[in-house]
Image (spheres, grey):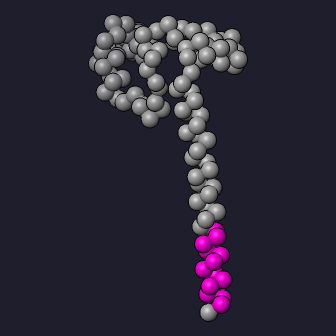
């Protein structure tokens, strides 16, 4: 009976330590996200210049754009539909399409 209680106590300790590790890793990532969203545009530019001059210039351009107030969410990825719609609005041919046209012109084969 005593060995059963000892085994149960060990399992509870291990489970508790695992939960502690999981919750301790979640809190810092939330803190970083929350603090990033509270920065002003000038703070974001200054922070970008700390990484490098190119990053600072890119951040200045981003802050001047109309989408500067939108918060980027990594889970919002471009899907195939939005990519095709953006390609349909572009009047210029892509590099691949230009290559296909050139290949057809050189070989004389039209598909």
64 left or right of 42 in image: left
The C terminus, quarter of image: top left
Residue 57 location (% of width, % of height): 61, 9
Picture layout, residue 100 above or below residue 4? above
Indicate the quadrant where residue 109 lies: top left
Q: Position of residue 95 (x, y in %)?
A: 44, 13
Q: Residue at x 37, y 10 (%)?
A: 93
Residue 108 in sight from this viewpoint: no
- How many badges with numbers are in the image? 0
Q: Is residue 35 visible?
A: yes
Q: Quadrant of the N terminus?
A: bottom right
The spot of residue 50 in percent (x, y) is 71, 17
Q: Is residue 9 magenta?
A: yes
Relative image position of residue 22 (x, y in whole percent): 59, 54
- At x 55%, y 33%, the residue is 33
Q: Residue at x 56, y 21 (%)?
A: 39
Q: Quadrant of residue 67?
A: top left
Residue at image point 46% right, 9% down:
65
Please, which residue is most extreme toward the bottom here? 1
User: Does residue 32 show up magenta in the picture?
Assistant: no
* Residue 15 shown left or right of residue 100 in the figure: right
Q: Depth check: 92 or 20 in front? A: 20
Q: Which residues are magenta?
A: 2-14
Q: Main secondary structure of the magenta part?
A: helix
Snapshot quadrant of residue 36: top right
Horizontal placement of 83 versus 63: left or right? left
| 59, 4: nearer the viewer | 4
Judge left or right: residue 48 versus residue 77: right
């Amino acid at each position: 009976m005593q060995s059963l209680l000892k085994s149960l106590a060990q399992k509870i300790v291990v489970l508790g330590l695992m939960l502690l590790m999981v919750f301790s890793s979640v809190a810092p990532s939330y803190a970083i996200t929350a603090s990033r969203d509270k920065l002003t545009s000038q703070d974001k530019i200054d922070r970008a210049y700390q990484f490098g001059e190119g990053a600072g210039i890119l951040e200045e351009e981003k802050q001047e754009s109309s989408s500067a107030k939108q918060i980027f969410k990594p889970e919002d990825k471009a899907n195939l539909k939005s990519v095709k719609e953006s390609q349909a609005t572009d009047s210029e041919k892509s590099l691949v399409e230009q290559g296909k046209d050139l290949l057809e012109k050189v070989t004389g084969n039209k598909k």
